[in-house]
Amino acid sequence: MDKCVENKLNELREYLKKIEYINSSIALLQWDSMINMPKKAIQYRSQMLGYLSGESYKLSTSEEIKGYIEYFKDIDGLNDTEKAIISNIRREYERTKKIPEKEYKDYVMDGSLSGSAWEEAKEKSDFKIFEPHLKKMVEYNQRFVEYWGYEGNKYNALLDIYEPGINTEKLDALFGQLRDAIVKLLKKIRESQYKPNTEFFTKSFSKESQEVFAKKIMDKMEYDYKGAGRFDESVHPFTTNFGNKDVRITTHYYENDFRSALFSFIHESGHAIYEQDIPDDLQGTLLATGASMGIHESQSRFYENIIGRSKAFWEFFYPKALEIFPQFKGVTLDEFYDGINDVNPSLIRTEADELTYSLHIIIRYEIEKALINGDIEVKDLPRIWNEKYKEYLGVESENDAEGVLQDVHWSDGSFGYFPSYALGNLYGAQFLKKMEENIPELFTEIAKGNLNIVHNWLKDNIHKYGAIYKPVDLIKKVTGEELTAKYFIDYLNSKYTGIYSK
Amino acid sequence: MDKCVENKLNELREYLKKIEYINSSIALLQWDSMINMPKKAIQYRSQMLGYLSGESYKLSTSEEIKGYIEYFKDIDGLNDTEKAIISNIRREYERTKKIPEKEYKDYVMDGSLSGSAWEEAKEKSDFKIFEPHLKKMVEYNQRFVEYWGYEGNKYNALLDIYEPGINTEKLDALFGQLRDAIVKLLKKIRESQYKPNTEFFTKSFSKESQEVFAKKIMDKMEYDYKGAGRFDESVHPFTTNFGNKDVRITTHYYENDFRSALFSFIHESGHAIYEQDIPDDLQGTLLATGASMGIHESQSRFYENIIGRSKAFWEFFYPKALEIFPQFKGVTLDEFYDGINDVNPSLIRTEADELTYSLHIIIRYEIEKALINGDIEVKDLPRIWNEKYKEYLGVESENDAEGVLQDVHWSDGSFGYFPSYALGNLYGAQFLKKMEENIPELFTEIAKGNLNIVHNWLKDNIHKYGAIYKPVDLIKKVTGEELTAKYFIDYLNSKYTGIYSK
């Protein structure tokens, strides 16, 4: 490459590092505000966050960055990484530049206040506390959509943030097939005579013993929570990171349910190893992150469900669980396996079974689409929420905390994110198909506790690329096919027919 | 005031907020790196810190700030706060501007690396690990001193950072009197037949019970560690804050010594209430901090020793301690009081008794002065350290961890800070004199647990001013006199003659 181009690239890399340092600082301030911050500090903290976000905004929309974008527009001979760096900053520049700086700063600050209003509202189970904040966040997003412009549905502008290449047309099709298949399977299951036993999960399990067991699994997953990460407690489990050597997860323990913290540990560890695997040379390029939110969720949900709720996984781990938890005395592996795969339409998304989970997402997808298009109003959300839950899942919440207030996402305005979870299911099953082609002995090895073969495959095929490839390109590169709902539907049919045809 | 001047002042206040947001972010990143950060993250974290420090540097040395300094140079009619804001930014501008930006950034980054080298060195009790880092930090400071310029002794340039108005000439005099008085008292004590019993302190005290008891004291001190603060564990106890509503302290528990965590809780809480008391309208002006490090230490050491090691204090708290700690069964209040005031020259500064404590500081003062002036070399420190400890305190360390490596301060280059601790003793006794004049029933009230009268006095006379007044002006304003060693020496003589003339 031309010496001159090379210098310019190095210069750009130095510039991008500054954005990454600020973004990492923001992420740490946010993590701290969820984990450590005393309550009275919220106002000052949100001012700090507002200021840093403004600085990040300035750097991403500066004349300097514009100069880089223009310089590299006509440069040939860049490799995939370099091309991705350029197209990524262009994309961010164009999106960010369209929002006035003041408005963006206010958005971040209001998002921080809204976050603590949500926490309080959830604690008191009172939607009214959260309502004015949520209304604000919806309005911000409606204005942003207009600034950005969109093709077809307004909601497409938001989908594009988290899953470039996906739009409501595609989602309506994919989610339509998925919903039909799930509804059909649910009907079969309801008609089945068999009902897995789950009562042994709701005995008392101390926090300490849950942690000991979770560590055994995280160790096998190769999430380095000691040297390059940590885990803490928070209201809502999440993963965050500041570089690839400080990747933190959180969980929420329930002493009267064995499953909750366990599967959230596995889920968040799936996110965490993705971030830890992203190579050093992508750090500071703004590509040191997942290919998309959907791909990120594909990793967490792959571990949580496809691996973590498989028979093979528990062939290895169930004997270990028995050593720690006398609560399971007399429960066979088959009973345990059926129990963790019990299908039971319920209110809380994060506690949902693998089969009905996607219905939770489809509900949020429909609500978000309608909110952003102005077809429904924030004040009507508790009613709409309950109607949809009754219709799709046949359950009704008794209060806002286990209804419309259950999830954190809307509090900071992350509309368009939820579909990622269901897309993650589809990506995951499509990856599994390929993984089994490459490693025919996959589940035999898992049954021996050799989760490293799963990790290695994911690292080599997905993690090591960070955000170099768009999800639409990555899925093709890895599996040779475009995203389809087929494999996930096949997987669900095969697994749940197996369990429920006893 | 002129509308135009008022606008300019408001503009300046907005500008200064930015510096404070960055400085608070830096403080949070540093706190996190001591409390939460996984080890492998140190490199990236120090890059983040380096970047943010560079930004803070830029803001403090910008053309804009220069413009403000020049604008306000000839403006009359400013109130004390406004004058202090201007003189403070001028002082910082002049000091900071003289250090090249690159060098300052490197200094902060190297300081972060040096901090973790110190931690490792202390853990392994191996000075060699720390030596090259410490050498670097000394050299930075030697260069800085030359950039800044100095009158008389080179070390004066560093003293001026932490205690404006103090120089080696004054210190030599104050510390000289202090040393002579302590040595004389020590001689008397050595000749005394009486030796307080302390063996009941070294039974086993669980962390949990220590925490329960510490909370009772912090509650009475009115340190709001729930809503506007928190406490954690760290190798070396410290206090940090991000605004006045997020003031965090740390401690280090020893299960086999009742005194260590207890008095560090009291000490750090003394710092913490100072920061919490600084009014909202000083926040974001760069004056929302203590008047100086010496004044800050006067508050912490006032609570730790003058209050926390007084008979009156324990008249109230000892019965509470007895409820929690059966370890003290049969120990009378007098025995307990004599025990916490046992004079016992020893190796560790933070564990030192009130009387010999200042000798630890005088040793560091002499070493720092010699280091900065190039009279001694870093590599010789362990030997010099041990010689001085033998000479002044009659004790000898068996390893580096309890010798030259015991304190964190030098690791990030904070030379000139140590004298603050002994100055804090002097300020504190001088404040006490005045406080007793104002409140003759002071110790009677303390004996009833009414620590709020102490807190109110300190708040009204010291805390509420933040850094508006220089220490040299503040001590005069509050006590009507210049700083003197007299009151502290009187206090020591009276207290320790009382205890040891049994």
Image (tube, coloured by chain):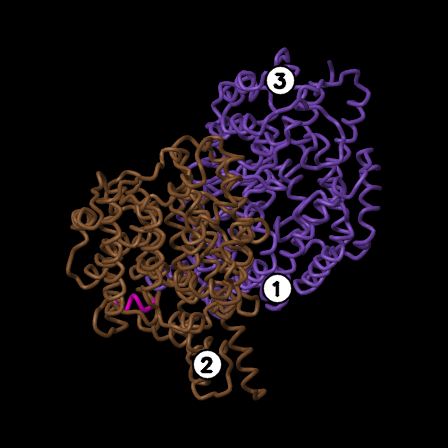
Chain colours: A purple, B brown
Relative image position of residue A282 (x, y in whole percent) = 43, 49
Query: Looking at this rendering, what residue extends furthest in the top direction?
Result: A330
Q: Main secondary structure of the magenta part?
A: helix
Circle 1 or circle 3, nearest the eye:
3
Quadrant position of the C terminus of chain B in the picture: top left
- Give the number of the disc on residue B68: 2
Of the image marks 1 and 3, the number of the one nearer the N terminus = 1
Badge 2 marks a residue whose secondary structure is helix
Q: Amino acid at mark 2?
A: Tyr
Q: Quadrant of residue A4?
A: bottom left
Query: Disc 2 vs disc 1: which is toward the camera?
Result: 2
In the image, the segment drawn in magenta is B156-161
Q: Which residue is mark 1?
A: A104
Q: Point out which mark residue A454 bears.
A: none
Classify residue B433 as left or right of residue A53. left
* Front residue of this view, candidates B42 and A121: A121
Q: Is residue B362 visible?
A: yes
Q: Amino acid at mark 3?
A: Gln
Question: Identity of the amino acid at label 1?
Answer: Tyr
For label 1, the SS is: helix
* Mark 2, other Cα within 10 Å: few <14 / some 14–19 / many ≥20: some
| Residue to which mark 3 is pinned | A327
Cα separation, mark 3 vs mark 2, equals 70 Å
Q: Are marks 2 and 1 on the same chain?
A: no
User: In the rendered image, which quarter is residue B300 located in?
Assistant: bottom left
Q: Is residue A476 above or below residue A10?
A: above
